[in-house]
Image (cartoon, grey):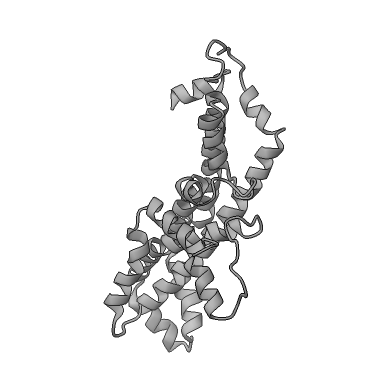
Amino acid sequence: ILYSLYVSLHRYSLKYPGDRGFIGLRNFADYFVSEYFWSSLQHTVVFVVASVGLTTALGLGVAVVLNQVFRGQALLFVVILVPWALPSVVNGLMWKWIYNSSYGSLNGLLWSLGLIDRYQVFLGDPGRAMGMLVNAFVWREVPLVTILFLTAMKGVPEDLYKAAQSDGADALRRFLHVTVPSIRTGFLLVLLYETMLTLRTFDLIYVLTEGGPGDATSVISWYTYSETFRNLNFGRGAALSYLIAISTFIVASWYIRVLAPRREA
């Protein structure tokens, strides 16, 4: 970590191995006047907000269902865990096949249902690529979020639900006024983990889009990889990595301030 900080403060490019002079914060400053950086930052915000929002909402909904007692509950739980059991690269390859514009199963399904009259380009369309990327990420992460929420729900005292029900609260009110406040720690854990994960997601992007088409899915993590291992500029790559780390710390601090349980005096 300390060495990467040292590298970020120097002109450190493998294209010019003899020129490694100290340049201070210039690597950092250059990003703030780079249009590509701001474009990547915008794509990152879209990817993080969409992915974390959908993952949290869907995981919470599935956890509410699994928190009930019904026949086949155990089987459903096992089925839901399957996406999470897949390695991330395998998940990316699977969705790349599903999205394929020539023989993908998504096109086949939509065509069979009469929703399209010809096969569509998904990953090659700048207007669709980010949505396809978010969908693949959410599909894999929902099971983990479900487990975290379900664990938090199991810790809510049953007496609270009985008291609310005796006061005339219906299922929705019990959920909003009993379940949600009682699982604040669960929300904090989910939002922290998923935000950090989305900010540094690289493997899924590498497999599905490589930042394309054009720069439609070029998020900060992909930009860091391109700057470091494609442009061979380790100084700028290290600087960008530190910007990601600082951003993650700021977001995590805000989550903790808002969602962490308050200690009574």
Residue in the foreground of this view, choosing between 144 and 164:
144
Q: Name the residue: 69% across, 33% down.
A: 32
**Residue 33 in view in this figure:** yes
Instruction: Identify whether 113 is placed above or below 142.
Output: below
Residue in the foreground of this view, choosing between 62 and 76:
76
Q: Name the residue: 55% across, 47% down.
A: 251
Considering the image in quadrants, where does the N terminus appear?
Answer: top left
* Residue 238: percent from left, percent from top: 52, 29
Number of callouts: 0
* Residue 224: percent from left, percent from top: 54, 36
Residue 38 occupies which quadrant of the picture? top right
Instruction: Identify whether 81 is placed above or below 225.
Output: below
Q: Judge from the rendering whether residue 159 lies leftward or rightward of residue 249; answer left or right.
A: left
* Residue 160: percent from left, percent from top: 39, 77
Considering the image in quadrants, where does the C terminus appear?
Answer: bottom left
Instruction: Identify whether 85 is placed above or below 58.
Output: above
Q: Name the residue: 47% across, 54% down.
A: 194
Residue at far top of view = 18
Instruction: Identify whether 2 is placed above or below 70.
Output: above
* Residue 19: percent from left, percent from top: 57, 12
Residue 9 occupies which quadrant of the picture? top right
Residue in the foreground of this view, choosing between 235 and 118:
118
**Residue 261 in view in this figure:** no
Q: Name the residue: 59% across, 56% down.
A: 130
